[in-house]
Amino acid sequence: MGVVLLKNLFAYGQPTGAGVITSPSKTQLGHKARCAEKGYDGSWVTATTVSNGDIESQESSGQQTPTGSDTPRNSKSWLRRAWTALIGFRPTPRMISDAIIGLADGMTVPFALTAGLSSLGSTRIVQLGGVAELVAGMISMGVGGALGAKAESDGYKAKLADTSKLVLESSAEAVDIVHDTLKPYGFDHGQRNIVSDRLRQSSDQMVDFLLRFHYQEKKPDPSRPWSCGLTIGLGYAVGGLIPLIPYFCVGKHEVFLALYISIGVMCVTLFLFGYFKTVLLAEQDCDKSTWKAFKGGLWMMALGGASAAVAVGVVHGINMASPALEH
């Protein structure tokens, strides 16, 4: 019994009572109805009650419990499949998050800076200032992301050391924590004793259980610091290069032409970025209407436009108040 309970805990990621998979909630059934209204097909995880014995018999007979792969296809999975086919690898959610952070800053800060410098009337100044900011921002954003990921890894290592010390030096306290962790999920006293007695036979399993279910800690990828820094830095460079390109394609005194081109390009780019960001990060795309993604695009475009407008106003105001800066 204890082995079955532990197996279900670690296999399914979260305790659900005495090994029972409960029927879907009203929210899940609402998802099903809304998806059906929108024309999505595909099976849904139906309301089932599976006991521990049923789970074991399914695993032994090779049957599989319905999973998320049976749920309706959505735009998020389509975009990720297309990305995988084109690039050759599938980005993780953390990589997507890092890329969004870099792109979001890269498409707003350099755009605001180049727009502000345009009020000085010199394409050369915009080119030099934009490139300098792009390089400095890429480095600072990449280093900041790497340091943040390193701090996350160090935090996990510290929590791992503290938990291991607790299990070795105070097993009774560790057992109490196991009971407190399982109690909210419907485990009675006898079942909690079965699980805790089984965990006490292996200190490694006890530590793993406490980290995963009590402290909600997940072991970070060892390559996370450098991959995070690289992804954020490159995202910033790509996003920041877009508003800067028009200034290299016009004459020395055509800075305002480059500004207008840059504004047009960035309006489209910011809108598309906000639109697809909303689609990619949506948890249930059948619930996320096209209007919500459209609002995400408009919000991103408004944010970038406001930043650029403030920068132009500040630089123009300083330039008008201090004519000496022109010499």
Image (tube, rainbow, N blue to C red):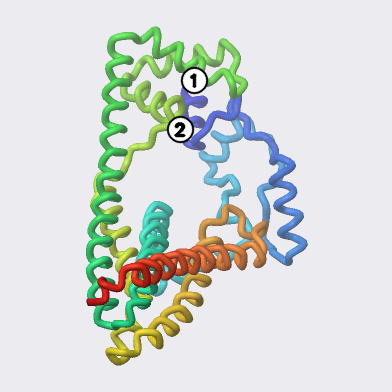
- Residue ID for mark 2: 10
Give whichever of 3, 14 is nearer the camera: 14
Q: Residue at x 56, y 46 (%)?
A: 63
| Location of residue 270 in the rendering, given as x and y in whole percent from the top left corner | 48, 70
Give whichever of 112, 120 is nearer the camera: 120
**Residue 53: which quarter of the image?**
top right
| Location of residue 258 in the rendering, given as x and y in whole percent from the top left corner | 38, 85
Is 18 placed above or below 304 here? above
In this orientation, does residue 80 appear? no
Q: Which mark is residue 2?
A: 1
**Residue 95: which quarter of the image?**
bottom left
Q: Residue at x 29, y 82 (%)?
A: 122
| Location of residue 269 in the rendering, given as x and y in whole percent from the top left corner | 47, 74
For the residues labelled 1 and 2, the Cα–Cα distance comes to 12 Å
Is 179 placed above or below 302 here? above
Is 199 placed above or below 319 here? above
- Is 181 positioned to the left or the right of 31 in the image? left
Q: Nearer the viewer, mark 1 or mark 2?
A: 2
Amino acid type at mark 1 = Gly
Amino acid type at mark 2 = Phe
Q: Residue at x 72, y 53 (%)?
A: 32
